[in-house]
Image (cartoon, rainbow, N blue to C red):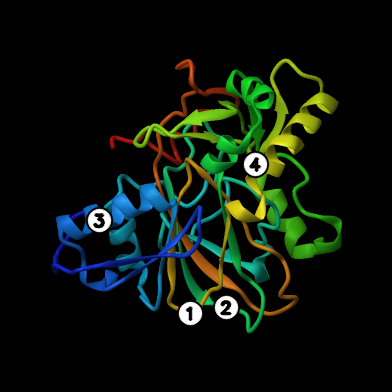
Amino acid sequence: MSITTAIATAIEVRRLGGRIGAEIHGVDLRAGLDDATFGEINDALLRHKALVFRGQHLDDEQHLRFAGRFGPLTTAHPTVPSAAGQPHILPVDAEEGVRANTWHTDVTFVQTPPKLTTLRAVTIPAHGGNTLIANSATAYQDLPEPLRALADHAFAVHTNDYDYVQPQFENEAAHDYHKVFVSRRYQSAHPVVRVHPESGERGLFIGGFAQRVLGLSGTESRDILRLLQAYVTRPENVLRVQWNVGDLVIFDNRITQHYAPDDYGTQPRRLFRVTVAGDVPAGLDGRTSRVIEGDDAGHYTPASVA
């Protein structure tokens, strides 16, 4: 995606947590980025895993332009329709049943999940509606050695077809959205421990779409995945983003999970999501992810050329 304007800036990176997150100040994403500034932002993202840009108020094209600096874009989603006239933008709209009230990494049910996720706030509730983002690299570092040895060699099956809506939040909109979400079924096997292709860090690559561990029974899988997941979501690993209208957040989908608590009742909440295409995950021994069911989602994402 071409850059029509490039303005040199001096950015300031303010850490938000001991393990994850930073706010970026001194940059106007509407104006475009020179290569040096973009390089600083990319370096900050690799280090902090999640970045918050306050008060940017991007329009669709500015949002697409910024996300496109990181690589080719996916379309909005493998099964869910895009925003009208914008094939790369996914509306995340509570009134349409989109309430991601579970820990997950975006679209891990396909063989090549997104590299990065960007979100911009359009309508925010007066209270609640935050986004939580967790560092799966520090979660891996915290594992005791016997559990780490198990995770290092395991593969988990991720699928879009599972009951992710908690009963207390079920309604007609959520039910209709789920029908669309699973209108095409996908299953992919990914390494439980993924090696980050740029930083070389190791992270737990699981989350809500991971439903079973290859070679284990359903009961054993649930127990192991719950145990590993508990390390990801420890409070010390988690950043809570409190939204304001106009904010933009970007996080590294290869080494984080996120969660949007459904704690805002009937208040409206609307974000727009743009994701950057990723590569095929690889584990410690070099084995890579594979498709178990469904196609390679080529209509959704190209293999990253980054």
| Image position, residue 185 (x, y; %) | 65, 35
Q: Amino acid at mark 2?
A: Ile
Viewer-closest of 221 and 200: 200
Of the residues under marks 2 and 1, which one precedes in the sequence? 2
Look at the image and tell me whether residue 208 can be seen.
no
Q: Based on the displayed image, in which of its 4 quarters is residue 32 positioned?
A: bottom left
- Asked if the residue at tag 2 contacts the one at tag 4, i.e. Cβ–Cβ closer than 8 Å, the answer is no
Q: Is residue 33 above or below residue 270?
A: above
Residue carrying label 1? 245
Of the residues under marks 1 and 3, which one precedes in the sequence? 3
Q: Amino acid at mark 4?
A: Gly
Residue at 71%, 39% in the rendered image: 161
- Asked if the residue at tag 4 contacts the one at tag 1, i.e. Cβ–Cβ closer than 8 Å, the answer is no
Secondary structure state at the residue bearing disc 3: helix
Label 2: how many residues lie within 10 Å, few (<14), some (14-19) or many (20+)? many
- Asked if the residue at tag 3 contacts the one at tag 2, i.e. Cβ–Cβ closer than 8 Å, the answer is no
Residue at 25%, 56% in the rendered image: 40
Secondary structure state at the residue bearing disc 4: loop
Residue carrying label 4? 207
Residue carrying label 3? 40
Of the residues under marks 1 and 4, which one precedes in the sequence? 4
| Image position, residue 6 (x, y; %) | 14, 65
Label 4 to label 3: alpha-carbon separation: 29 Å
Label 1: how many residues lie within 10 Å, few (<14), some (14-19) or many (20+)? some
Label 4: how many residues lie within 10 Å, few (<14), some (14-19) or many (20+)? many
